[in-house]
Every structure is written in C-alpha cells, then in structure tokens.
Image (cartoon, rainbow, N blue to C red):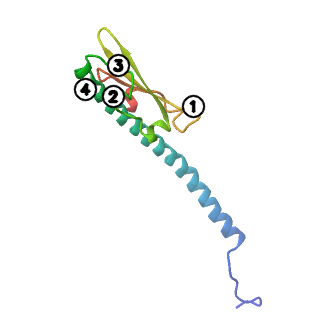
Amino acid sequence: MSAHGLQKGFSLIELLAVIAIIGILSAIAIPAYNEYLVKGNRRAAQAFMLDVANGEKQYLLDARAYTASLTTLGMTTPPEVSANYALSIAVSSGPPGFTVTATPLAGGRQAGDGTLSVSDLGVKSPANKW
C-alpha cells in the first residue's frame, strides 16, 4: 500500500484510450448503419412500386386503360415511402403503358440514392438497385 492510500477511479490515459476506441467504432458503425437505413427505405419503395404496378394491371382489365392516380387504384403511399420518396405514375397511350417512378426527396436520407422506376413491361431501373 502506498503512502497515499488506495487509488480509486480511472487515470486520464485510460479515459482517453476508451474515448479513442469509441470514436473508432463510431467511425465504422455509423456509416454502415446509415447505408442499412438507405437500403431498407429503398426496399420499402420498391415493394410499394410493385404493388402499384400490379394494381395498374388489374385496373387495365376492368377499365381497358391505365390510370395516373393512386386514388383511382384505391391505394395510398405508405408513410415510410412518402417520407423519403415522391411517387408518380406516367401513363402513355397507343399502346397503353405506364411507368411508376419514385424520386428521392431533396435533402433527405435517400437523396443520393437515385430515382427508381418500374414499367408495365417489368423494366426496372436502375437495374443494379433492384
């Protein structure tokens, strides 16, 4: 036992080492988590876009035309999609067709992810994100 008695607590060097380790782990974990969130948001948008495409095909059987309105299809954009993407449907005539497009909202987490689309022919773009 030293002349000063028992020491309790942590030294400054031990605290700095722990802070450095936490910083290194954060530098690795936070970008990976953000990428995970971006992929999850993209998957939610893609799933809804495929639902819309199926709804369009069913609508075509009934009305002999496609519609540019989710309301006409009896659908609403889920909150997890509308929080990150603006969804639109472009309808073409002769021969009839449609393209469902999800554009990331500016300034949001998905902003750098790019625009997603799916057509009546099943063409999905960009292909590397589907």
Q: Amino acid at mark 4?
A: Gln
- Which amino acid is tagged 2? Leu
Q: What residue is disc 4 on?
A: 58
User: To which residue does mark 3 refer?
Assistant: 98
The answer to which of marks 1 and 4 sits earlier in the sequence is 4
Q: Is residue 32 above or below residue 95?
A: below
Secondary-structure class at tag 3: strand
In percent of width and height, residue 102 lies at 44, 29
Q: Residue at position x 70%, y 87% from top?
A: 6
Going from the N terminus, do you reach mark 2 or mark 3 first? 2
Image point 57% across, 31% down: which residue?
106
Image position, residue 95 (x, y; %):
29, 10
Q: Quick one: label 4 or label 2, which is nearer the N terminus?
A: 4
Mark 4: few, some, or many residues within 10 Å (few <14, many ≥20)?
A: some
Query: What numbered label is drawn on residue 106?
Result: 1
* Alpha carbon distance from label 1 to label 4: 32 Å
Give me the C-alpha separation between circle 3 and circle 4. Answer: 13 Å
Tag 2 residue: 73
- Rounded to the nearest angstrom, the CA distance separating label 4 from label 2 is 9 Å
Between 47 and 88, which is closer to the camera in this rendering?
88
Residue 96 location in percent, x, y?
A: 30, 13
